[in-house]
Amino acid sequence: MTKIRVLIVDDHPVVRRGLTSILTNMNDIKVVGEAESSAQALEQTKALRPDVVILDIRMPGSSGLQIIQALKQIHAEVKIVMLTSYDTDEHLFGALSSGAHGFLLKSIAHEELAEAIRRVYRGERQLSPRLVGRVLGEFETYAKEVSRHKAGLTETQLEILRLIADGSTNREIAAQLHWSEITVKRKISEILTQLNVTTRTQAVSEAMKKGLI
């Protein structure tokens, strides 16, 4: 059986030894090395060519986030899993956008960690369950932005659609946006044209289908 070669990078000896002890008990995983700093991680990756690097975020020297790209330049096929206690959006999305294949919290169960390593080795992406909702929420925001650009609608036009969906009349929209009713009518007419519909109800329905409001 070909074992998955793993390099553990963490500045705490107790954490490294604990992870090594856990993973050594797995028949299909082999810990080939440990590193306590970013510099050592780069050296060990170059020398050992691990399949998977388990990487902490905060370490002496460069942080884990800062060396992800450097690790991949040294060994393009390496899979990187962030294993950390920090679950801020900055760390999560920073790691994923830098090319990490997984982002796991240190509270993860032993078997779940081993399975995550196997999945990442196969090319899958892995997140701790409580972080999935955050990533999906970010994707939803991005998808709405893409739809808005495709529809050619401005943020002001979306606000008008939201007010229409809430049941506001042209007069109420004019009062809220400090416009004249004539301006509101013109703006709504422009929205209808851009969405290729003929009524306010159809405009709201189309915007909802596209996930714009």
Image (spheres, rainbow, N blue to C red):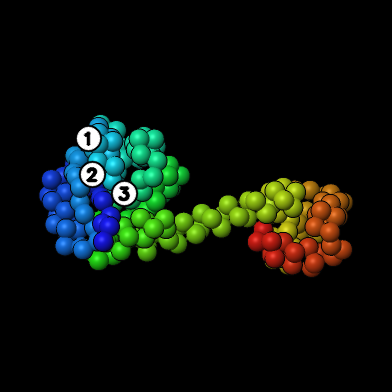
Q: Amino acid at mark 3?
A: Asp
Q: Examine the image and state in which quarter residue 41 appears.
A: top left
Where is residue 130 shown, x and y percent of the image? 37, 63
Disc 2 crowd rating (10 Å Cα; few below 14, some 14-19, many 20+) is many
Where is residue 183 shown, x and y percent of the image? 84, 49
Q: Against 37, is 33 above or below?
A: below
Which residue: 81% across, 64% down?
200
Where is residue 16 shown, x and y percent of the image? 16, 49
Give whichever of discs 2 and 3 has the lower sequence position. 2
The C terminus - image quarter: bottom right
Give whichever of discs 1 and 3 has the lower sequence position. 1
Which residue: 85% across, 65% down?
199
Q: CA distance from mark 2 to mark 3?
A: 14 Å
Q: Mark 1–mark 3 contact, CB under 8 Å?
A: no
Regarding residue 38, the answer to whether it shows in the image is no
Q: Examine the image and state in which quarter residue 163 appears.
A: bottom right
Q: Against 204, is 42 above or below?
A: above
Q: Amino acid at mark 1?
A: Gln
The N terminus - image quarter: bottom left
Residue 51: numbered disc = 3
Which residue: 78% across, 63% down?
203
Which is more foreground, mark 1 or mark 3?
Answer: 3
Residue position marked by numbered label 1 in the rendering: 40
Q: Using residue 156 as the reference point, say whether residue 197 is left or right of it.
A: right
Q: Mark 2–mark 3 contact, CB under 8 Å?
A: no
Give whichever of discs 2 and 1 has the lower sequence position. 2
Residue position marked by numbered label 2 in the rendering: 9
